[in-house]
Structures are given as structure tokens and as C-alpha cells.
Amino acid sequence: MPQTTLSTANIILSTFNARYIHTAFGLRYLYANLGELQAVTSLDEFTIHERPIDVAEKLLNKKPKIIGFSVYIWNVSEVTQTVSLLKQISPDVIIVLGGPEVSHFPDQPDVVELVDYVVMGAGEISFRQLCEQILQGTKPLNKMIQGDVVTLDKLTLPYDLYNEEDIRNRVMYVEASRGCPFKCEFCLSALDKTSKPFELNAFLDEIELLHQRGARNFKFIDRTFNLKVATSVTILEFFLDRMSDDLYLHFEVVPDNLPDKLKQVLTRFPAESLQFEIGVQTFDSDIQNLISRRQDNNKTCENLRWLREHTGAHIHADLIFGLPQDTLENFAKSFDLLVSLNPQEIQMGILKRLRGAPINRHTEQYQLRYNPLPPYNILSTRDIDFFTMQRVSRFARYWDMIANSGRFPHTLPLILLITPFERFMQLSDALYLQAGSTWKIALKRLFDLIYRVMSSEMGADCEALTLALQKDYQRSGQSGLPLFLQQQTKQKKCKIGTANKRQAKHRL
């Protein structure tokens, strides 16, 4: 985008993305709706791995009058540090915050005290109006500004703001609708009144232009992509008409809504061209009722089985640990059932406190205790103590390394025999005792640790375990051999050498 090359800018739109591959979709919406102010606005994205002091320097180099930051649970620490520096170095710069982390007054982070204005909720129109007032010298008296919600047809779509670098190397976030009709209390979308669609033809025209420019990786951020099946089918047919080996589509889908018309289209997609993010969260109907979650568990299981058996879609299924009323033993039942449905990935999420989320009404009754620091993960509940929560957090990390990574397809079935949750928890506990960490474990060392724990503490058949690990290691492309394979190779050579000596002696 040409505005990123400005040496000076009256307005800077900025944020910290979790990774470089991500793009700041919200900032592009703000920029697209700035009207004439676009000419004096720069859009500058960073990642959470960059030093706040370096970011502050880059921003101030453009001599801005206004800097707007988009604040989320994953970047509030970095934004806070950067804003603190900016206000020390250049206190006259007007700083405006927006985003879900600052949109729920009075439940707001400390960084709000440091800034000049906060736009809460929808910002496409209200941010522009605020900037116009500031630049005209008529600053609003109210620090907290409730964003104006307008009908979606009044918004300028931002898709032409993806530049060539974005298209080549980053994810294209797109949305065919906004909002969610469901009221799951752990999610901020529970605050939405309903789901509203963008005008479909206008949306597909924009996607067609992106596709013509070379975009092939589309991530739909719609909370309920398959809510209106006719629209879902139209969008899927659009991409089927443009199918290529490098096209990849990500959708978040409602797990219990998969009618035949939608199934017929899904079977036509090539393997690994679709990814479905499916929020199961829990199979416990009592917990579902407690947190206002509507889910037909039987339909969910039936649909997950159908997707695995009849499509090549990659299934990323979510579970949440730490929900009010849940226990370790009860969560294990949801986990074991989900494992039996065989999704390629199970995301083990630990409940986090989202500001404004309705689940916060249960905090006192269920003694929900959260980390006071981002990402505000739950530390204990009435039914789950802190040490159990730590065990499951380690379980989740090791599960990502071993199961979700796809590196252990031959070994994983040996780990999950009969009682998957219990067995993997046993492995997780032992790995932590051996390694002392869940981070920075080299892949070769991980193979050794798994062999050591499973052979000595989990009663695994050593021959079958060795064969499975050996196959998985060969698939990894790593050079050399893990220590346990080196030792077994030496032992075999030793036995062969001894046998040859005995045979030679016998011949004499």
C-alpha cells in the first residue's frame, strides 16, 4: 500500500500481530473507511516479537499527530509498553485505542489510563470522525467513545488494501458475514444480536479480484460460516470453479449443521484444500446448558465422522478446559470421545477471561481464578485446583508437539491405546519430569524421551514402539539417529559380531 512509504503522516494505524503471516484485517477496514484522510494516513504493522522501543522509534520517525492501536488479548502487553514509551518521548501525540481488549468499560486494561481516546466496538465510522475533529482542533471531551454501528452496505470493503507482499506470503482474512446468533458465554460473539451477511455478489466480486491478483490462501473469519447453507454453497461453488493445487480455504463451522446440500459440495473438493475449525468445546450437556451453548452432541459426532470418511477436509476441533462445573475426569470423557472421531487436530484450549464475555457472571459461584496478566488463562476453579490446571496446560503443549504436529502418526496410536486421555496424561507427566520443560525440546531429543517413558513406565512393547518411532523419525527428515536408535544399532552390531566369532570358532 502506498501509504506505508510516507515519511510523515498525520495519522498512523498500527498494531502488533501474533506472527508475520497474519494481517491486521481490522486496521485495513479502518483505513478503507477514512475517506479523504487516507492521503495523510500510514498503516504500519509489527509483530509481538519486535521490541517496543524500536516500534516507538519507527512510529515517531513519521512525525504523526495521531496514532491508533488495535488491542487484543495477544498484544496488550506490547501495546502497553509501546504507548508508555510514546507518552514519555512525545506526550503531545494523540493516542487512540480500539479493539476487543479495550471495548468493555469499565473492565479495561491499565493502558487505557495512558491514552487520549478509546473507541469501543465498531470503529470504521467513529475513528474517522474522531480524527477529523482532532485535526480540526475540536477535540471531544469524552475519552470513551462508543463506536457507531452502521449497516454493512455502508462500509467500504478493504480487500484492495492487501498488497503484493500480503498476497504472496500472508493469510488473506475475509468475511462474508459479521456477528453470531449463538450465545456461548465464553465467547465475545455472545454479545452480538445476530449474524448479518455482506451483500454476496459484492463480496464475491472482491474475492474474485483478490484471486486474479494471485491470492490462494483465504481464511474466513465468519463465526458461523455454515449458518445459512444457501450462502455457504454459493461461496464454495465459487471456489470450486477456480480450484487449483495451491488453493486453501479455512472456515469456522457449526458442528451440528451439515445438511445434504452442503455435504454434496464438500465431497467435490480435493484433499487438503479445506480446513474446518469446529468448536466442540465440551460434550457435557449440563455444562452446555450452564454456559448457554446450543449443540446437538449426537449430530456433532455424526457430522465429524462423515467429514473424516467422505471428505479430504482437515478438521481442527476445539475443546476448552476449565469451564465452570467441569472436572478433570469429566473433561477426559469429552477428550476421549473426540479422539474416537479422529479429527486431524484437537486444539486443547485453556479457558481465558475475555473482557466483557458473559461467562464472567459465573466467576464467584464457581470460584474462577484467572491469571491477572495476559492472556488471562484460568488458574483454578471450584472443581479444578491450580496443580491440575498446570498438568493440563503441559498436556496441551505436549499434545501440540506430538499429536497436532503430525510428526508421530505411527507412534500416536500406541500412546492412545484404550484410554487416550489417561494414557497421554501419563506420558505428559513423565515427559515433564524427564525434560523439566515443555519448550525448546529438540525433535531428536523428543523421540528419545518418548521412547524412554513409554518403554520404562507405560508398558509399551519395545519392538513395536521402536518400529513406530523409527518410521516416524524417517518421515521427519532429520539427520543422524536419536540416542535410543543409536544404542540399538550398536547392540545389533555387537550381537552380529559375537555370533560371527562363535561361528568362526566352531568352524575351526
Image (spheres, rainbow, N blue to C red):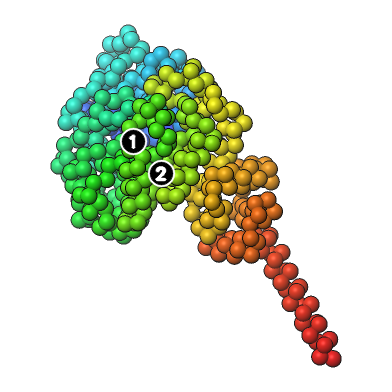
Q: Position of residue 422 (x, y in %)?
A: 57, 44
Q: Is residue 247 visible?
A: yes
Along the viewing direction, whichever of 357 and 324 lies nearer the viewer: 324
Identify residue type, mark 2: Ala
Relative height, residue 16 to residue 424 (above, below): above
Residue at 33% over, 19% down: 119
Q: Position of residue 103 (x, y in %)?
A: 36, 20
Mark 2 surroundings: few (<14), some (14-19) or many (≥20) residues within 10 A: many
Along the viewing direction, whichever of 351 and 28 lies nearer the viewer: 351
Q: Residue furthest bottom?
A: 508
Residue at 48% over, 23% down: 80
Identify residue type, mark 1: Gln
Residue at 28% over, 11% down: 138
Q: Indicate left or right for 96 with 323 as reference.
A: left
Relative height, residue 313 to residue 337 (above, below): below
Residue 17: mark in rendering: none
The reply to whether discs 1 and 2 touch (Cβ–Cβ < 8 Å) is no
Quadrant where the C terminus lies? bottom right
Mark 1 surroundings: few (<14), some (14-19) or many (≥20) residues within 10 A: some
**Residue holding disc 1:** 295
Residue at 33% over, 10% down: 142
Q: Position of residue 507 (x, y in %)?
A: 81, 91
Q: Indicate left or right for 300 with 108 as reference.
A: left
Q: Residue furthest top?
A: 141
Q: Indicate left or right for 148 with 250 as reference.
A: left
**Residue holding disc 2:** 317
